[in-house]
Image: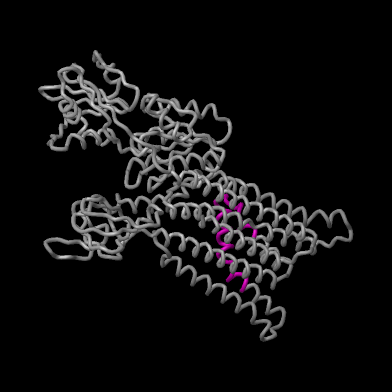
């Protein structure tokens, strides 16, 4: 994401030149004491120089039937002032308006630059090693499996695996984690990390467009595609606001002279023009999108990726948080608790048979079984294995069929003699239609899970747990975390149905779902807000979720809600500030107690105040 483009620099230079030329034309009559009939030409010239962009934009919008905006209001005010012979005021109105536009543009540009600079995850140069020769390349030129060099102090440009070296690495750009972490050969690193003190050779896993940093920057850059209700409100507001202001101004200019003999038309016409100038809704148009952009930037600094402003409102109004259990509330690092083979089957044979099938899966339980079996055993990978979400794995070869999964999988294949165990998570194993026994595995809740749930309760948010595990295993975790409501033995589609029930019963606020971003992708999509935990670098998480917690920290769930609530407060503060101050100044203008110059200063001042207030959303 570029910080300031050449286009912006040229545009700023053009605005400064335009304003300077207009000011020069404006002050020449005063310096040289030019006669009034000639000086009016200089004032009109200043008006045209300063206002030509506004006038042209208003004309284009009129031709396209999109005239209901601030350009129309300012053009009417300026042309009207010339019409009644107030040439200096007409010129100064446009000069002040253009100056205000420049200051607002500059303030917004600098604020966006400061936000994007702090989130700048990209590297411009990549050092590639090939046959002992190191060359400088652009990130887009690097291919998968290329070897790149990252020296101390440099940013890691692409996702990859360390093949040589070790280092302390700063992950804060992606995760918000302030303390560096140690990485060693064989560890995966992501683009956007910073190598603090080591020399690393990294084998590239993803091309630049598919790298984690690129995806995150792209999502942030296009986050305004998901507009909030507040932003849509401003769009609708402007559609009706402009014609209403024009009608009121017309009535203000015409009605008093018609009904009161002492009312002078030119005085009331001038009041109407001042009324138009004051009415420009710049503060609303600029500050509200900037508030949400600042909120997105502030959340990203904390390791929370929020995809659009509409999700801020949904998060802020959350009343129920629904959690997946395995890998979300628990560590997902299962250890084998016990092996329960049937008669004539050894524990080793039971474990080896299970590992044959589980070796093809990346599920946390599968990894625990494979890891236990690999102690002294070599496992082959069977491509014929089929993983059935929520049930288990079926491995078919020429010689055998192995079923490894839960009770429901055994039941569907009519396996007889199944033992029942309700103490821990249970994995049943069958080979060639014969039941071999079961394995129990244990998991534990994350250390920060209790604190995260407590903070949600403090925010008056109810927590519910959904799991495919049995009731007893789920009950143990629920008791540890003080979760009153939980539902067990759920398949992925059943989780969606259960979430639908929860949403239908919830009459107030929104429902968020927190899952691991892979197995729970369908449920993440269905929730009002889907939050993926530990989704960093995971395509399914970034695509399916509305919010991605980049470092797997459960404490970021209540933090994201607090950030959303603060951002919304700032948005509504700006709306209230703009509308209330505008109302006061509009009344003063209608009563003739506000000059046109003062009206422009008021409009610019409110806009700048709203912009500065918006930037508070960046600091969380």
The figure's colour scheme reads one colour
The residue depicted at 39 percent of the width and 41 percent of the height is 446
Query: Residue 128's spot in the image, x, y percent?
Result: 20, 61
Q: Is residue 90 left or right of residue 320?
A: right
Q: Which percent across, then down, holds residue 62? A: 58, 54
Position of residue 549 relative to residue 170, above or below, is: above
Q: Quadrant of residue 250?
A: bottom right
Name the residue at 23% across, 50% down: 205
Q: Is residue 345 magenta?
A: no
Between 375 and 45, the one nearer to me in the picture: 375
Q: Camera-side residue: 201 or 596? A: 201
Eyeballing the image, is 456 above or below 171? above
Tell me which segment is drawn in magenta. Answer: 46-73
- Image x and y of residue 496, in percent: 42, 28
| Secondary structure mainly formed by the magenta segment | helix
Observer-nearest of 260 and 442 = 442
Q: Position of residue 194 (x, y in %)?
A: 32, 60
Identify the image quadrant of the N terminus.
bottom left
In the shown orientation, is residue 587 left or right of residue 493?
right
435, 400: nearer the viewer: 435
């Amino acid at each position: 994401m570029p910080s300031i483009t050449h286009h912006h620099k040229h545009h700023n230079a053009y605005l400064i030149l335009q304003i300077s030329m207009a000011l020069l034309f404006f002050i020449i009559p005063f310096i040289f004491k030019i006669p009034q009939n000639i000086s009016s030409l200089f004032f009109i010239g200043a008006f045209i120089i300063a206002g030509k962009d506004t006038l042209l934009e208003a004309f284009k919008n009129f031709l396209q039937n999109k005239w209901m905006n601030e350009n129309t209001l300012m053009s009417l005010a300026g042309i009207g002032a010339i019409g009644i012979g107030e040439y200096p005021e007409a010129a100064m109105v446009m000069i002040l308006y253009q100056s205000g536009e420049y200051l607002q543009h500059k303030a917004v540009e600098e604020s966006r630059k400061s936000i994007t600079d702090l989130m700048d995850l990209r590297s411009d140069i990549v050092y590639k090693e090939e046959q002992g020769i190191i060359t400088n390349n652009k990130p887009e030129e690097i291919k998968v499996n290329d070897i790149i060099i990252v020296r101390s102090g440099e940013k890691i440009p692409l996702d990859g695996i360390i093949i040589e070296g070790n280092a302390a690495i700063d992950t804060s750009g992606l995760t918000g984690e302030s303390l560096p972490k140690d990485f060693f050969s064989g560890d995966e690193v992501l683009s956007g990390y910073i190598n603090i003190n080591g020399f690393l050779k990294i084998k590239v896993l993803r091309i630049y467009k598919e790298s984690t940093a690129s995806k995150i920057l792209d999502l942030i850059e296009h986050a305004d595609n998901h507009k909030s209700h507040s932003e849509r409100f401003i769009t609708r507001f402007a559609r009706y606001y402009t014609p209403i202001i024009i009608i009121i101004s017309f009535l203000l200019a015409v009605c008093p002279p018609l009904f009161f003999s002492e009312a002078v038309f030119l005085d009331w016409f001038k009041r109407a023009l001042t009324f138009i100038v004051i009415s420009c809704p710049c503060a609303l148009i600029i500050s509200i999108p900037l508030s949400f952009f600042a909120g997105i930037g502030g959340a990203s600094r904390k390791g929370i990726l929020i995809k659009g402003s509409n999700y801020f409102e949904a998060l802020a109004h959350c009343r129920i948080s629904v959690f997946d259990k395995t890998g979300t509330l628990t560590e997902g690092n299962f250890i084998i608790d016990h092996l329960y083979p049937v008669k004539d089957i050894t524990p080793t044979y039971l474990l080896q048979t299970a590992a044959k099938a589980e070796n093809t899966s990346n599920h946390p339980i599968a990894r625990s079984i494979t890891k236990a079996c690999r102690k002294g055993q070599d496992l082959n990978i069977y491509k014929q294995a089929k993983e059935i979400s929520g049930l288990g794995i079926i491995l078919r070869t020429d010689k055998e069929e192995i079923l490894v999964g839960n009770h429901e999988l055994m039941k569907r294949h009519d396996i007889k003699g199944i033992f029942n165990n309700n103490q821990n998570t249970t994995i049943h194993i069958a080979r060639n239609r014969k039941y071999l026994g079961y394995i129990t595995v244990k998991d534990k809740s994350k250390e920060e899970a209790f604190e995260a749930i407590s903070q949600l309760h403090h925010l008056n948010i109810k927590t519910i747990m959904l799991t495919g595990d049995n009731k007893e295993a789920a009950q143990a975790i629920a008791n540890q975390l003080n979760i009153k409501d939980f539902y067990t033995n759920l398949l992925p589609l059943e989780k969606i149905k259960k979430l639908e029930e929860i949403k239908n019963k919830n009459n107030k606020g929104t429902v968020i779902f927190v899952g691991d971003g892979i197995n729970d992708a369908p449920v993440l999509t269905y929730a009002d807000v889907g939050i993926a935990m530990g989704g960093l670098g995971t395509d399914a998480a970034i695509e399916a979720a509305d919010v991605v917690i980049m470092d797997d920290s459960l404490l970021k769930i209540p933090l994201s809600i607090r950030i959303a609530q603060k951002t919304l407060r700032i948005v509504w503060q700006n709306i209230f500030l703009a509308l209330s101050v505008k109302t006061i100044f509009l009344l003063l203008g209608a009563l003739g107690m506000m000059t046109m110059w003062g009206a422009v200063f008021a409009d610019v001042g409110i806009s700048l105040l709203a912009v500065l207030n918006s930037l508070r959303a960046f600091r969380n």
